[in-house]
Amino acid sequence: MDWKFVTASALMAAIMGVIVFFASLSLLDFSVLVGVVATLIGFYYLTTKSTVSQALSSGFYINAILLFITPVALFLPTLISEGELSTLASLYGLFISGIIAAVGSVVFAATGRFFQKRARPN
């Protein structure tokens, strides 16, 4: 394996791990473990690709999906819990972070599309 390929796969896997860590913050005790496991699984999956561009495009697509579902995973436990004030705050947080996550997901998906087009010869 080339060092560029390993570096690109490790970078994409690290971003996956950070996103999964934030999505699993409601699991307080296990969120770091879940983030590390997601990083390792992502790195293994991305190293099965044949080129750097394929690894980057797959990584950006996966990160776009993870980033899009993160606000729901982060605020869902608070929405289910008791209390009107916490539910209202969670709805507000879900709305704001949902918009930010949607924009970030579009940027990640567009970047993934760029690398996918680059990986495919014309």
Image (spheres, grey):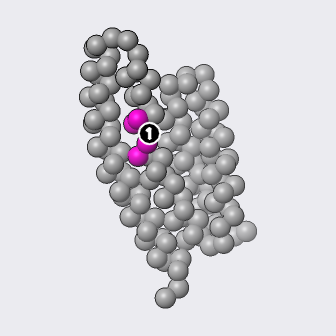
| Residue at far top of view | 83
Which residue is rendered at x = 40% and y = 28% of the image? 75
Q: Quadrant of residue 99?
A: top left
90 to 64, vertically: above or below:
above
Which residue is rendered at x = 50% and y = 42% of the image? 19
89 to 53, vertically: above or below:
above
Q: Which quadrant does the N terminus fall into? A: bottom right
Q: Position of residue 25 (x, y in %)?
A: 50, 28
Q: Label 1's element? A: helix
Could you tell me if residue 3 is visible in this image?
no
| Residue at far bottom of view | 122
Label 1 packing within 10 angstroms: few (<14), some (14-19), many (20+): many
Q: Is residue 83 left or right of residue 121?
A: left
- Residue placed under numbered mark 1 in the picture: 70
Could you tell me if residue 90 is visible in this image?
yes
Tell me which amino acid carries mark 1.
Thr
Which residue is rendered at x = 29% and y = 27% of the image? 91
Q: Does residue 33 belong to the magenta stretch?
A: no
Which residue is more in the foreground, 81 or 33?
Answer: 81
Magenta span of residues: 68-72
Which residue is rendered at x = 51% and y = 65% of the image? 57
Q: Position of residue 85 (x, y in %)?
A: 28, 14
SS majority, magenta: helix
Q: Position of residue 87 (x, y in %)?
A: 31, 19
**Callout count:** 1
